[in-house]
Image (tube, rainbow, N blue to C red):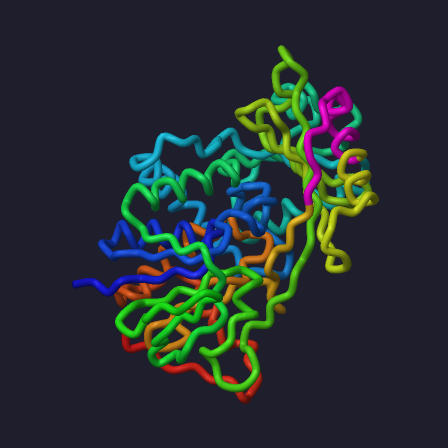
Amino acid sequence: MKKPVVVIGGGIVGLSTCFEFQDAGHEVTLIDPEPISGATHHAGGMLAPIAEVQFRQPELVPLMKESARIYPDLIARVSRYTDLPTGYRTEGTLVVGADRADARHIADLVDYLEREDLPVDVLSTRQARALEPALSPRIAKAIGIPGDHQLQPRLYARAVLDAVRARGARIIQDTVVALEGASPCTQVTLSSGSLDTAGSIVVLAAGLGAAKIPGWYAGANPLQLRPVYGDMVWVRMPAGMDCLVSKVVRGFVENRPVYIIPRNDGTVTIGATSREDQPHSSTGGIHDLLRDAIRLVPGLEETEFVEATCGARPGTPDDLPYLGWAGSNLVVSTGYFRHGILLSALGARTAVDLVAGRELAQGLEACDPFRHAPATAHSTPSTA
């Protein structure tokens, strides 16, 4: 008999983890007071290991590439258990620069991608506008990334939650107050009771909330999580008007990053600022996003404003996730920062691989949950 699994956290990482454990034959319990209400609700949803690559963060590259590779299979399996849409699209990404300085930025990006052996198509601005006629005629440089995909996070998360429910998961809508012990974690204490987990696997996938749950570590909390806020704007195309772009457009405008994501429902998502100062939408940030998006795709000025939100992403000191054993039956899976949607597929599969004792994907040794722990914290080797 495979051990039952308790997953703490109902964002895209936790939901995907529930689904993968169900696929592996485990009974699953999900604990979250309000699933899909955290960072997932505010995410862009780009499955873009190439466009999302960051300078001086080579450890992220193999993780993002592997997660993007396995994502289509995960989406196909989820779709067997739900009729809900996922918003999955495969048209690729265009990266454009607004002026000469932004063109230089993109040229540097191309050099870096080529050194990392990541495929990219260098385009003339005329070729880019042939692909996306709504682009401004003033853009200075463009590249194409055909392998990047996207999904609509709110839709996809609802679909995964529906699939998890359809497969018989127990869902407890309550707040986790503490975990009792790590070797093993014998009990999950809730705000209204407790759950015996002595014979179970526990996965802590609660995003920023993971750092607020004590009891499983000795001394200071090893999870050095910080909130990184980002503004997102949603607009809608006027009735009878086709979407302005068919691909994700990522751009640099006076060195400010912006992305424009077309959706199947006629909306367009515009994001995303990144700051660590205030946990609410910034008027200046929203202004910058709209101004820069319109600079690249002028027709966006004619769209209907729908919504602006601000989400908090769980960052770590080195921007790598915390993913691995934290005790004899406890797996930590959090700290995915800007890449939570993309890396959720790999995070979910890794949790199952850890429990099954299988070989892990390249690069996961850098994600040790105790790598930033003070000397007073310690982990216990897995025996699960």
Give whichever of 56, 82 is nearer the camera: 82
Give whichever of 347, 210 is nearer the camera: 210
Question: For the C terminus, which image quadrant?
Answer: bottom left
Question: How many numbered badges does the structure rendering display?
Answer: 0
Residue shown at 68%/43% (left/top)?
309
Question: Is any atom of residue 323 visible in this view?
Answer: no
Magenta-span inclusion, residue 298: yes
The part of the image, by quadrant, that contains residue 192 is: bottom left
Name, please, the residue furthest toward the bottom.
Answer: 376
Question: For the N terminus, which image quadrant?
Answer: bottom left
Report x, y in % for residue 18: 36, 53
Name, please, the residue furthest toward the left.
Answer: 1
As drawn, is 62 to the left or to the right of 285?
left
Report x, y in % for residue 269: 64, 34
Q: Which stretch did the figure color magenta?
A: 292-309
Name, please, the residue furthest toward the top.
Answer: 240
Residue shown at 34%/57% (left/top)?
29
Report x, y in % for residue 290: 77, 34
